[in-house]
Amino acid sequence: MRILLIEDDEHTAARTAKGLREAGHTVTRAADGVDGEALALAEDFDALVVDRMLPGMDGLAIIRSVRARGRQTPALILSALGEVDDRVRGLRAGGDDYLAKPFSFDELLARLEALQRRAAGGDGGGGRLSAGDLHMDLRARRVTRGGKAIALQPREFRLLEYLMRHRGQVVTRTMLLENVWDYHFDPQTNVIDVHISRLRAKVDRGFGAPCLHTVRGAGYMLRAD
Amino acid sequence: MPIKLLRSFAFRQGLVYLALFALSALALLGFIYGFSAGYLSRQTDATIAAEITALEERYQAAGLAGLQRQIARRVRRQKPTTSSLYLLADRNYRPLTGNLSRWPAAARREEAGAWVDFTIGGAVDGDDFFAPRPARARVFRLRGGYRLLVGRDLHDLQQVREAIARALLLGLLITFLLALGGALVSSRSATRRIETINQAARDIMQGDLSRRIQSHGSGDDLDQLTENLNRMLARIEQLMSGVRRVSDNIAHDLRTPLARLRGRLESIRDGEGGGAALDEALADTDRLLATFNSLLRIARIESAAGAAGRAVDLAAVVRDAVELYQPLAEGKGQSVVAHINPAPQVRGDHHLWFQALANLLDNAVKFTPPGGRIGVELATTGRGPQITVTDSGPGIAEEMREKVFQRFFRAEQSRSTAGNGLGLSLVKAVADMHRVTITLGDNRPGLRVELQF
């Protein structure tokens, strides 16, 4: 992925760029809003990571300007303002995702890859998702593994669907809360873990190799080995 | 004092009214004067005209001698106050009869029937000497070339006019003084009340945020201003105390974990602990960040003015929260019993309500022993929707029930469990923001939390 990182904090920018490069992406950096906007308009990137408060030009203004030229490059907003209202404002300006500072790098990477997947059109339509011998029929709302039907509660179904849409990617707990439960909130305990282990009990138990993995310190990943 | 008074808005306003008042009083009194003086003049002229007519008739009836007798009688009989002037003269203005010693020069050229104003300075009634006095008369020619002059000494009339003018001027002065006094008194009471507000503002700027402006109690516009200012001050004080609380909390409750983190990092630098110590330091940092975020969040909720106006389906929010926490509770061997009835929509922020319910459920799961029971109910009472969360844990002693809403407060039995002591503070902040009453009660055994919308 070619990523444009517009971030004025040198430390955050350097760390983020290093991490993204290690994950195999190409990173171009801009340290202020004006440069950032010029770069975003001049070159073709696969994703933009934009800090909300920048010298020269507001991060949201950059995204608006990019969208105004008809560019649909996925954009992730980084911000020290993490309340729901700020998030809504960011998304309304044309951002595709919003990450409150301080963030863990794994969270950023997971979200960027999810954005990329979404921009690429997800899993080619047909209403079917699969990972190895795990299949999901979105229309019939049926899940089978190795030909055996698995009965899931509605929420479990949505959880598995999200994991399958992002198979091979790390999915963080916050991403799950936002996308499967549709609430922006801060769980005091790892309440999501219980749901994952319930799902795991249905999807993995008795089926040989597990496909639902815990990624330590980051989240979960669905992977068919 | 006079300069200060002149700079007072109320006093200047009073002066403007005073000037307007004085002008209108002047106009009114001027009118009265003109009218009454004019009336007196017209009266005099009418009397003179009537006398001339009478004397002319007399002349026609009784001839010159009769007229002279009549004039002499009139002069004799006249009261000292009326001071009528009569003079009968021949065609060469030589006086024949009357109380004027000679024909006034000003009246010589006048046509018969004309009015003349002149000055009498000599003797009236022969000997008496007067200072020059104004007089007014009408001259008339009789058949035979005789000239008749009938007039009035205007001195007394002038006196009366001057008396009227003096009385009116005095009245004007009194009016002016009364109005000035009134302006002073009324502006001073307004100025005093404004000064009360100013004094309070100065006190508040000195740092006394709890100071309020004393209300006059009359309910007038200044009182309404006072009340609004007081309300604004209350709001400012609330916001300021919110800021102060957050900084106090940071000082008291974040310093300890920061010090602990520093200790860990030091020992890592010194080569102790290895990877596990790094993980612990990271976990410490995450906890600190979470605490910090919660604090900021509570502060923001507390300073938010009123609930944002989006419709919230409470039943959906409660159902989702229960569904999220049920597996956790069941994993601990607790049973969750939910009675969720449809409730009227309320306005607010459904993310915040979800957070509040999550915090309540999280507490319930944390403090309820295995085999215990957690209850969630959404019902509609006469006052509106009501959410009740109950557990069968240790509950909260009555004297502690207000304290648990304070930031970082942790009841004795909760010290050993995970948590940052901010959960209930946030619930309280969300409830307050939405003007929802939160009540902690005894579930016998356990805690009963009621949110009354």
Image: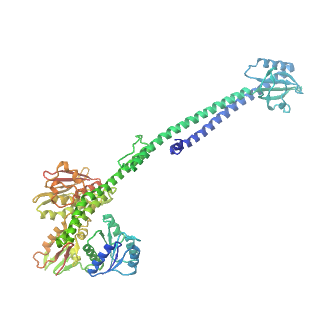
> Against B37, is A219 above or below?
below
Between B218 and B85, the residue placed more toward the observer is B218
Q: Residue furthest front?
A: B270
Residue A64 at what x, y percent from top left?
39, 72
Residue B170 makes an appearance in the image? yes
Colour basis: rainbow
Between A86 and B315, the residue placed more toward the observer is A86
Residue B10 at what x, y percent from top left?
51, 43
How many numbered discs sit on the rendered protein? 0
Quarter location, residue B255: bottom left
Quarter location, residue A130: bottom left
Residue A58 at what x, y percent from top left?
39, 70
Quarter location, residue A24: bottom left
Q: Quadrant of the N terminus of chain A?
A: bottom left
> Against B168, is B363 above or below?
below
Residue B206 at what x, y percent from top left?
39, 49
Residue A154 makes an appearance in the image? no
> Against A64, is B135 above or below?
above
Q: Quadrant of the C terminus of chain A?
A: bottom left
Residue B86 horizontal side relative to residue B203, left or right: right
